[in-house]
Image (spheres, helix red, strand yellow):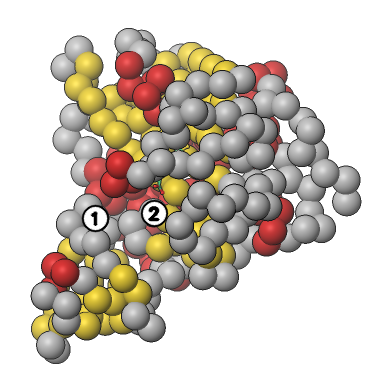
Amino acid sequence: MKDVNQNPLNKKIINSFLRIKDFSKVKILIFEEIDSTNRYLSDLISDKNTLYVCTAEKQNKGKGRGNKKWESPTGQNIYLSLSFQLEKNSQLNGFSLMVGLAIRDTLSELYDIDSKIKWPNDIFFDHKKFCGVLIETKYENNLLKIVIGIGINVFMHSNDQIDQDWTSLKLIDGEKSFDRNLIIGKLTSKIIDYSRTYEKYGFSHFQKPFNQNNYLKNKILTSENFKGKDCKVKEVDEEGRLKVEIDKEEKLISSGELSFKIKE
Ligand code: BTN
């Protein structure tokens, strides 16, 4: 199959794949180069009924979770941030897991890629990470603004700056023709669609599909949080907390509380 690697990010094409009903406006912003799409949308004074979709060919200061850098070379990957206003009391732990599921489902529908979600929201294929999510929030005019940052490795085939096992869509399936504009459009629509369901029913609606694709299920973890003791992962509960067993006792962990290593 022919590669669409050379297809630049394009507003009109992204827009043609968007299926968004409940915003009065969608603003798509595309940059050749930017420090960070998340930083841009965080600082932007936004309009209440607008969905902002910000993407770039390259980020100079791509932000990862835990103050890490997110490798963002030109034209190879997807660097996408979405921002909109949320209800003030939205429960964000489960929300971030729901975003992971939306990414997994979009890639499964478009390219038949069967990826797994490593709680809370990294996306893995064959034990290697190819996508990460950084969610930031901010109060603006007394409303909660959420910025959902998504990095998906698409065409990247080498990068010695990344300190963990990683992969990209093209490395997962070299035969397929990946289209960043298509992925951005479909993924944005899916996230908005799932967000509406989340606002109505909370995470419990997504619990089952999340657990079916839960990379950590039945894995043994070690963590400083448990004084180095082994813990076995069961599944996530209806609020998106990770249920683990330590010394035959069950514990629930909220995302952000735990830093861990997988033992087996
Ligand atoms: C992680 O550490 O796994 C999260 C990575 C998130 C990277 C994306 S790329 C688009 C957006 N802009 C940023 O600066 N970071 C996020």
* Residue type, label 1: Ser
Q: Percent position (x, y) of residue 89?
A: 17, 35
Picture disc at residue 121: 2
Q: Report helix, strand or loop for mark 1.
A: loop
Most extreme residue toward the bottom, as rendered? 248
In the rendered image, the vertical position of residue 113 relative to residue 187, given as above or below: below
C-beta proximity under 8 Å, tags 1 and 2: yes
Q: Residue at x 51, y 29 (%)?
A: 59
In the rendered image, the vertical position of residue 242 relative to residue 72, given as above or below: below
- Residue 175 in sight: yes
Q: Percent position (x, y) of residue 131?
A: 50, 51
The CB of the residue at mark 2 lies under 8 Å from ligand 1 = yes
- Viewed as shown, does residue 61 lie left or right of 143? right
Q: Residue at x 51, y 70 (%)?
A: 127
Q: Which of the pair 23/218 is nearer the observer? A: 218
Label located before the other in sequence (1 or 2)? 2
- Viewed as shown, does residue 197 lie left or right of 2? left
> How far is the residue under mark 1 from the one under mark 2?
9 Å
* Residue type, label 2: Asn
